[in-house]
Image (cartoon, grey):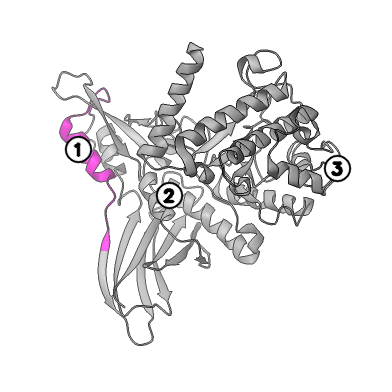
Amino acid sequence: MNASMTARRFFDKAFDIEHRRFGHRLQVNFADAPGDLSVDGQNWIFPKDYVEYHQVAYDYTTHLIDRYGKACTNFLWSVLNEPDLAEAFWRGRNWDELQKFYDYTVDAVLRAAEDRGFDSDKIVVGGLEIGGIFGTNIEGPILKRFLIHCSPRATGEGALPKNAAFADPRLDGRRSKRVEKLCRAFDGKGSPCDFVSVHTYEASKTAAEKLIVLKRIALETDPEYYAGLWVDSFESCPNWAPPPDPAAGDSYMGNGYFTAWCADVIRRQLAKAAQDRRYAFGESVLTVWPWPNNGDFSGFSGSINNESRAIPIDDNGDGKKERDLVIAEPILNFMALISSMGETYWVMPDQDVSGSVVSGFASKQSGAIQALVYAHNTTDTQARSGNAFNVTLCLTNVPWKKVMVKEYRFDKDHNSYFRYAAELSGRASCQSAPDAGSPPAGYRPEQAEKLRALSTLHETGQSMRLLAKDRQLSLNVSLEANGANFISIVPIEP
């Protein structure tokens, strides 16, 4: 009981920080039957008693709903985590039990929501979280049979013919209305599935194509049931385990590569959605590890994919760390701007210029037009090419007479501490500068303050424009290779 209460307090505190303090929507994940619930008393395997597990999943969901209320209807409820990755997260590789585990978990989540007065049709459930696949050959031993099993119409080898929770008479009177309605209409077949997630740790072109291929497989399986299926990547960045190479560290340390990679993945997904609206469902988020990157700028060490960095500070000059200052990584500010865009997009044409994809996309909301223009060279992880681009962005039918144009550039020279970090590590050409070679055990307060200032989002350009009667707006946009320029156009006079 004490261990259980301690664990609950831990998760409550972690979720409170994310949701109540920072306003983040939660993705709740049920990955296995832990501890004494499992068939062998160990983690990463299926339950010994599915009805017992169903009750635990129900209780846990109820606890979260009681704690966060209506906000839970906007959470994402995900089942499983990389069960295809050898024996790491689904021991025994029993795919029948995997399908059962999904059925019982989803039913418990939906029933808990219903018992608290919420419409379970609005609860977003899904999962799979495929992880051990590289390239676009993602069908594997799990995906197809999982999609067939969840579909109320499709049939195929390896898929359980019935919903396991619906078929279990011990759950009579305890199932969710949503499962009951679906399965009674299709002779016990089908399981609610609003999204499927595949983890993407590859070049931007491959990452985007992997998500597109997954949706295509779902549509081939059941074009009606999966027409609105979200295809997500709840773990996504250029590489999961970067090599011990300074270039890999630099790509996450604000040299522009990571931001341009994100822009290219998003643009490729939007381009496919523009061709076929059925691909316009889903979300992509970055992998966020539960710790900040460390403040060692000497190379790869600590320079991995996270949204913040802990800078050690030596306040009194004794060569020891007294405290940490947590600063934003450039990717955090960049994605905050991207997430502020609307839900209707226009995709710009793409060009290959000197090995860089140059493109972008735009969105309009009631109070602003926002556009992102970027250049991404997938092989130049250290952003060394030195190429620069001038792009003319032409907008027509702008609904305002007078506008303010604000620019936010992201590359190694803008909205980034990259250059200064190179100086601090002694890796820059100006190695003899006064700030060079500061010990990572603790930077001086003034050095840390400069890093904080460089990591703070700021405008890199602003201009007021008066539009002619044709309401056209032409903007000259400057880019570095592996750089992005976010543009916000807000009305001053309607």
Can you identify the residue that label 1 sits on?
449
Q: Amino acid at mark 1?
A: Glu
Query: Dot 2 surroundings within 10 Å: few (below 14), some, or many (20 or more)?
Result: many
Please state which amino acid type lies under the numbered disc 3. Gly
Q: Are marks 1 and 3 in contact (CB under 8 Å)?
A: no
Rendering quarter of residue 192: top right
Task: Give the residue displayed 66% in from the left and 60% down from the top.
Answer: 278
Q: Return the residue at label 3.
A: 156
Real-space CA distance between mark 2 and mark 3, rounded to the nearest whole angstrom: 41 Å
Given this view, does label 1 or label 3 mark the residue nearer the observer?
A: 3
Q: How far separated are the C-alphas under marks 1 and 2?
A: 24 Å
Residue 50 position in % (x across, y down) = 72, 24
Dot 3: few (<14), some (14–19), or many (≥20) neighbours within 10 Å?
A: few
First in sequence, mark 1 or 2: give its number: 2
Q: Secondary structure at mark 1?
A: helix
* Mark 2 secondary-structure assignment: helix
Side of 472 relative to 167 (left or right): left
Three-letter code, disc 2: Thr
For the residues bearing labels 2 and 3, Cβ distance under 8 angstroms: no
Q: Which mark is residue 259?
A: 2
* Residue beneath the point at 48% across and 49% down: 261
7 is higher (above) or lower (below) than 462:
above
State whether residue 31 is above or below residue 404.
Answer: above
Q: Going from the N terminus, do you reach mark 1 or mark 3 first?
A: 3
Image location (x, y in percent) of residue 194: 65, 47
Q: Nearer the viewer, mark 2 or mark 3?
A: 3
| 106 or 204: nearer the viewer | 106
Which residues are drawn in magenta?
438-461
Estimate the x, y position of residue 111 in percent, counting from the top left: 64, 37
Residue at figure coordinates x 56%, y 57% from the top left: 268
User: In terms of image quadrants, where is residue 403?
Assistant: bottom left
